[in-house]
Image: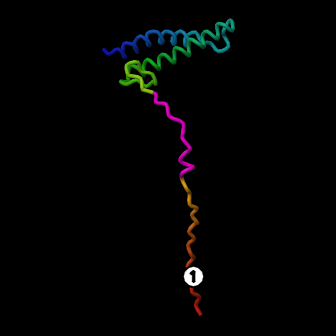
Amino acid sequence: MKERRKDALKLLAIATPMLAYGALTFEIGGAASTAEAITKSIVTTLGIAGTVAGLLMFFTKNSLGLINPKEPKAEVVEEEEPNDSWREDTVWEKEEPVQEEEPKLKMPS
């Protein structure tokens, strides 16, 4: 089994009980205190996010994130500031717009 799938199973092993606890103890308007309500909502949210991420990791082959520790880092190339000296040397000729003549219609006599 690949390391990615092992990590996915570890994540599912942690997130699934959190989701189950949050779903089974959630009551609308039945929390004894505000701290308990916040705790249950955070546990439920983390359980849902962890379960989705674990399933996604388990069934996909490639990393979907921006950070992958196995790939080499890309080199950052700094660009030089643009040099405006070319503007001084260039002579721009002003072109006049081309106007097409409208076709003249012959009037029947």
Q: Amino acid at mark 1?
A: Lys
Residue at 59% x, 88% y: name it. 107
Q: Quadrant of residue 22?
A: top right
State the residue in front, 67 or 52: 67
The image shows residue 65 at horizontal and vertical percentages of 45, 24
Residue at 58% x, 66% y: name it. 97
Callout 1: SS: loop
The image shows residue 108 at horizontal and vertical percentages of 58, 90
104, above or below 61, in the image: below
Please tell me whether residue 87 belongs to the stretch shown in magenta: yes
The image shows residue 46 at horizontal and vertical percentages of 54, 14
> Which residue is labeled 1 in the image?
104
Residue at 56% x, 49% y: name it. 87
Residue density around tag 1, few if under 14, some if 14–19, many if 20 or more, within 10 Å: few
Q: In the displayed image of the protein, which residue is found farthest to the bottom? A: 109
Residue at 58% x, 9% y: name it. 25
Please tell me whether residue 41 belongs to the stretch shown in magenta: no
Q: Quadrant of residue 35?
A: top right
State the residue in front, 48 or 21: 48
State which region is magenta: 76-89
Tell me the quarter of the image containing the C terminus: bottom right
